[in-house]
Image: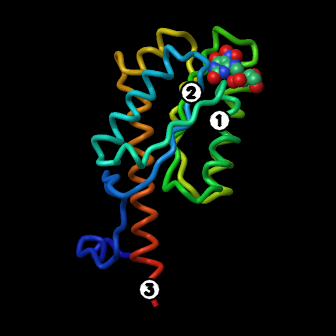
Amino acid sequence: MSPTNRENKNYREIQGELTATGLRFAVVVSRFNSFVTERLLAGALDALDRAGAGQDHVDVVRVPGAFEIPVAAKHLAETGQYNAIICLGAVIRGETPHFEHISTEASKGVAAAARESGIPMSFGVLTVDNLEQAVDRAGLKSGNKGFEAAMTAVEMANLLKKVKKEVASDE
Ligand code: INI
């Protein structure tokens, strides 16, 4: 497409809005490092509430650790009940010699579950060096990654709904 066309907007632009009304979400949250993950969960629920998701459209699903997030997220996606799934956890390097394994499995596992199910999944699993960094990203100095992950899920759920409505109805 030429620059001129871009300026004149001869193309259709589709992006998701940050509106959750009528959409259903699951939040998968791990109990490991719950001091941090409960704050991520509070941030995610705040975001969903602000975006207009009704509490009866949100399910919170708890798993033991970040390693268990992908399989729970995949099963939830396969129910067909959710527009998006928010994955929350905290893997802290200083606390485990198998940090790399857990964080890699969590990130690759969530990505694979989303790809295979076609249901958007946002990755709000902190992978950090120490507790201080984790707390900073869970509502202290560096925002709340749970809030961000929920907003990403809202945008993606909204986008896919629009794609279905606007593009799938094309001749
Ligand atoms: N799980 C986490 O979510 N974060 C961690 O930092 C962590 N550490 O440190 O080990 C952790 N381990 C548990 C893991 O996720 C599984 O629950 C466990 O290995 C059983 O499968």
Residue assigned mark 3: 170
Which mark is drawn over residue 89?
Answer: 2
Image x and y of residue 87, in percent = 55, 37
Whether residue 100 can be seen here: no
Q: Secondary structure at mark 3?
A: loop
Seen from the viewer's position, the closer of residues 82 and 110 is 82
Secondary structure of the residue carrying tag 2 is: strand
Q: Residue at x 45, y 52 (%)?
A: 24
The residue depicted at 45 percent of the width and 47 percent of the height is: 153
**Amino acid bearing label 1:** Ile
Reading the image, the residue beneath label 1 is 69
What's under tag 2, amino acid-wise? Gly
Residue 76 x, y percent position in the rendering: 62, 48
Badge 1 marks a residue whose secondary structure is helix
Query: Which one is earlier in the sequence, the residue at label 3 or at label 2?
Result: 2
Assess whether mark 2 and mark 1 are in contact (beta carbons under 8 angstroms): yes
Q: Is residue 108 left or right of residue 49?
A: right
Distance from label 3 to label 2 (Cα)? 40 Å
C-alpha separation, residue under disc 1 versus residue under disc 2: 8 Å
Mark carried by residue 12: none
Residue density around tag 1, few if under 14, some if 14–19, many if 20 or more, within 10 Å: many
Beta carbon at label 2 within 8 Å of ligand 1: yes
Image quarter of residue 58: top left
Few, some or many C-alpha atoms within 10 Å of disc 3 (few <14, some 14-19, many ≥20)? few
Q: Amino acid at mark 3?
A: Asp
